[in-house]
Amino acid sequence: NAGVTQTPKFRILKIGQSMTLQCTQDMNHNYMYWYRQDPGMGLKLIYYSVGAGITDKGEVPNGYNVSRSTTEDFPLRLELAAPSQTSVYFCATSRFREYNEQYFGPGTRLTVT
Amino acid sequence: QKEVEQNSGPLSVPEGAIASLNCTYSDRGSQSFFWYRQYSGKSPELIMSIYSNGDKEDGRFTAQLNKASQYVSLLIRDSQPSDSATYLCAVNDSGGSNYKLTFGKGTLLTVNP
């Protein structure tokens, strides 16, 4: 099992460009999450999904969009990239609602210049 | 605003010593508590979960939970240089969104040979 995979590993965007960060899991987990991590700031929840077709905003959703058409995939879309979106992005999954052990993908390091 | 507080460190201990990492949280209804280890440039890795008051041991790691004091800790016995990393405390949200986690900013641990 690959677990949680993310592509690309690294990306440099120009201001105003758009891109999609991919996240795929083969663990059959219902819950999926997107976080961003800035130096010294901890992990901040961007969007989450409790199952295919159901998504909701987290703590810092502005400038991002998501979709969840299948259990396996949870892409994160950046529209009109801004320097403030320079960060490391992690996708995570969990199986249970209550005993919510989350498992992280390897991350995507994004720079917007 | 739910908060999870950790000392940012760095916490420096000699090889073979016990490292003690602490975390306090504000959401009194939280039921699930996690410790993640994050090496520099890598994604968070789940190392301990605890759901009941008291101690939980796994190898060299012991998690301690005191819900009345809203306090959770991680002890690492016989610390090794390979334990040098940032340790993130995570706590689940109470109520209807208990599948979401709030993360602390992490404590940087350095184990000196």
Image: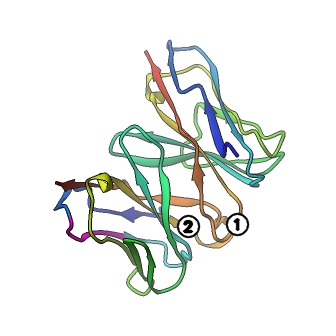
Can residue B10 be spotted in the picture? no
Residue A41, horizontal then vertical, whole percent: 37, 46
Pointer 1 with pointer 2, Cβ within 8 A: no
Percent x, y of residue A64: 62, 33
Q: What x and y, as percent, mark residue A63?
A: 59, 31
How many C-alpha atoms fall within 10 Å of the one at disc 1: few (<14), some, or many (≥20)? some
Q: Which amino acid does label 1 sit on?
A: Arg
- Read off the magenta span: B16-23
Which of the 4 quarters of the picture holds residue B93? bottom right
Residue A97 has which mark?
A: 1
Q: Main secondary structure of the magenta part?
A: strand
Q: Name the residue under label 2.
A: B92
Chain letter, disc 2 residue: B
Examine the image and state in which quarter residue B80 appears.
bottom left
Residue depicted at x 59% and y 40%? A61
Answer whether residue B19 is magenta in the image.
yes
Does residue B30 appear to the left or right of A1 in the view shown? left
Q: Distance between the residues labelled 1 and 2?
A: 10 Å
